[in-house]
Amino acid sequence: MKRILIVDDESAFTRLLRLTLESTGQFQVEELNDGLRAVEVARAFMPDIIFLDVVMPEIDGGDVASKIQADPELAGIPIVFLTAIVSPKEAGNETDIGGFPFLAKPVSVEAIKKVVEAHCA
């Protein structure tokens, strides 16, 4: 079972995504709605991959990603941004934001599965 950490300030989104992913029987999911606690929760949960919202109230996803990468215990965990700022149509051939892959919201379970397969050995 792959371990997924979802960090997004929208609790309805994280809850729905967690329930949907867990219902497949393929994932153990931890959801977090506070970007300031992302490093702490990631260290406790040790996910295989982190899905991280770009825009959050207290701290943006880029800053959270930098803190995760700076932590020696977490540095190797793949990070994928989730964003409602750019739609898949607007993104065109763009596949990353600031060097991180991203998925545009709303995100499908199929898209999550593809990303997990691509980034988790």
Image (cartoon, helix red, strand yellow):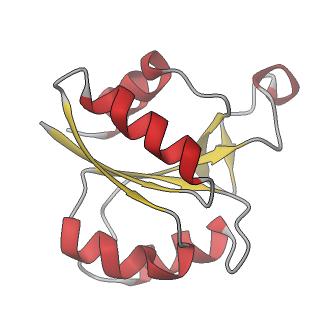
| Number of dots carrying numbers | 0
- The answer to whether residue 74 is seen in the rendering is no
Kindly give the residue lying farthest to the front in the view shown: 12
Name above or below for residue 69 compared with residue 8: below
Left or right: where 6 falls relative to 42: right
Q: For this rendering, which residue is in front, 8 or 60?
A: 8
* Quadrant assignment, res 99: bottom right
Residue 7 location (% of width, % of height): 49, 59
- The quadrant of the picture occupied by the C terminus is top left
Name above or below for residue 9 compared with residue 34: above
Name above or below for residue 81 compared with residue 70: above
* Quadrant assignment, res 12: top right
Q: For this rendering, which residue is in front, 4 or 99?
A: 4
Left or right: where 3 falls relative to 101: left
Residue 28 location (% of width, % of height): 20, 43
Residue 73 location (% of width, % of height): 23, 78
* Quadrant assignment, res 59: bottom right
Residue 70 location (% of width, % of height): 42, 83
Q: Residue at x 44, y 21 (%)?
A: 109
Q: Residue at x 70, y 66 (%)?
A: 56
Q: Residue at x 83, y 19 (%)?
A: 89
Q: Residue at x 57, y 57 (%)?
A: 8
- The answer to whether residue 107 is seen in the rendering is yes
- The quadrant of the picture occupied by the N terminus is top left
Kindly give the residue lying farthest to the right in the view shown: 90
Left or right: where 57 falls relative to 64: right
